[in-house]
Image (cartoon, helix red, strand yellow):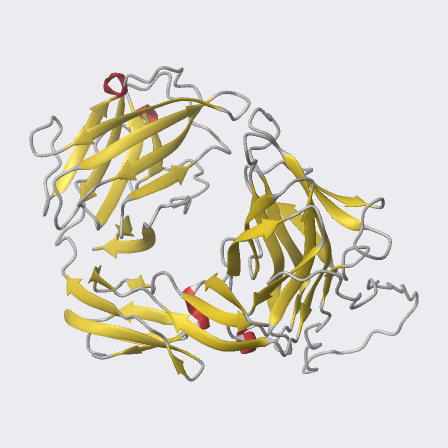
Amino acid sequence: MRRRGRTRLAAGASLAIISLAGCLERDTTGLPLAPASTDPVIFDDDFGGAVDFQAFLGSKTDAVQIDTENSRSGAASLRVTVPGPDAVDGTYAGGAFTTFTVRDLTRYNALTFYAKASMDATLDVAGLGNDNTGTSLYTAERHGLPLSTEWDWYVVPIPLPERLTAEGGLFFFAEGYENNTGYTIWFDEIRFDSLAVISDPRPYMATVTRQAFVGTTVEAESTRVTFDVDGETAVVTHFPAYFDYFSSNEDVATVSGGSISIVGGGSTMITAKLDTIDAVGSLTLSVLAPPSSPAPTPTVPASDVISLFSDAYPDVAVDAWNTYWQWSTAQLEDFTIQGDSVKLYTELNFVGIDFSTLTVDATAMTHFHLDVWAPEGTNFKVKIVAFNALGQLIGQAELNFDEGTTPAFLPGVWSSLEIPLADFSLSAPRDHLAQLVLSSTDARTVFVDNVYFHK
């Protein structure tokens, strides 16, 4: 929703810290914890109490600044500099406004804010519930919000406020350049509110059929709620934990706290509710047997190996085994086969594996290895991505494997992909390898183990 000229809602909040010297010590054992703050303010002339901004990975780190020359009302706004296509200090602007003292937001039903831009544009995403730790449960967001050169009011309805009893992620946004140019966005009066104009929630989850394995957990897909907001439609996409789930066969899958756990073979249908409202859609699960044995144990001497993931070797640091890039549907599960740790990817189309913080110098290595097991599928692709010393992409190369390649990819068995690095024909040095991308058109479920470079 967009509205012009709304009156100012609240003044900026401040936090006074008083230091008392010589206070008597006392036993606090058994005393109740202090209640979470219900402060609605995120930014209003200044940051709200205990609010901090954290730039997302890859964002222009200084994109957000306080601007005392432009504001919707009051003394200041937040100015966001969206970098252009040739920027070297970030490819977009984005980050999360978080708090180190969690807030109880159950009394509010919406995140609201004002925004304008230096040109007509479309804000990619804005929302709440992202605390930038990678462990958020209640992220909710709106996409494609139109920006103009005048102040407009925006509303992000909260799918189920009663879930937000202790939330650290207050507001987040992300935006890239448009029309091949960077530009400026201003935000003001970012806060939580209770609005009477939000009505008629219509929850939805994608109707899909998936394979799963005993011992894993799964999530519903494409969860969202459509609201009426003062006569306009607002679609809020959100993490699955806002819904309650129900299993038609608890011998196959059980549900607890929004988590769907696979406990036995067979099939079941998972349905959902938003509070008391039935969600449209369902998840049908067909449970398969995992590999009967682990992947072969590597025999290459540890001194000749740079391992990303293997129980046989010490591993170097990996930033993410699933980067959750846009358009990727892959879900990641840590799995154990007879005591051997593996990575399980389901709903795989492609998945990014990022180790760019501490890149791999594979100059002295001759091969790349990984073991992969899929119950079905005819092809599997591996891409290696190289950065330079400044963290910029300088090269990538991909290989495709099937039953006729050497090495071969076959379903139903552990395929040991022992790949000469020279086969990648990477048009860049191998001294700053930073990412892998695994993909397939028909192997939607894969187990991955023993991922390493060696000589």
In the figure, 244 relative to 376: above or below?
Answer: below
Q: Identify whether 26 is placed above or below 152.
A: below
Q: Residue at x 30, y 30 (%)?
A: 383
Instruction: In the rendered view, tell whether residue 44 sits above or below residue 407.
Output: below
Left or right of residue 76: residue 213: left
Q: How many marks?
A: 0
The quadrant holding residue 217 is bottom left
Q: Write the residue at 33% across / 18% down.
A: 426
Question: In the displayed structure, does residue 119 sit left or right of residue 318?
Answer: right
User: Is residue 302 in view from this perspective?
Assistant: no
Q: Which residue occupies 46% across, 41% down?
A: 319
Residue 399, x across and y down, in percent: 23, 27
Q: Position of residue 347 (x, y in %)?
A: 27, 52
Q: Position of residue 73 (x, y in %)?
A: 83, 57
- What's the residue at 77%, 56% (across, down)? 47
Depicted 384 relative to depicted 277: above or below: above
135 or 169, which lies in front?
169
User: Could you say which quadrant of the image residue 422 lies in?
Assistant: top left
Quarter of the image where the C terminus is located:
top left
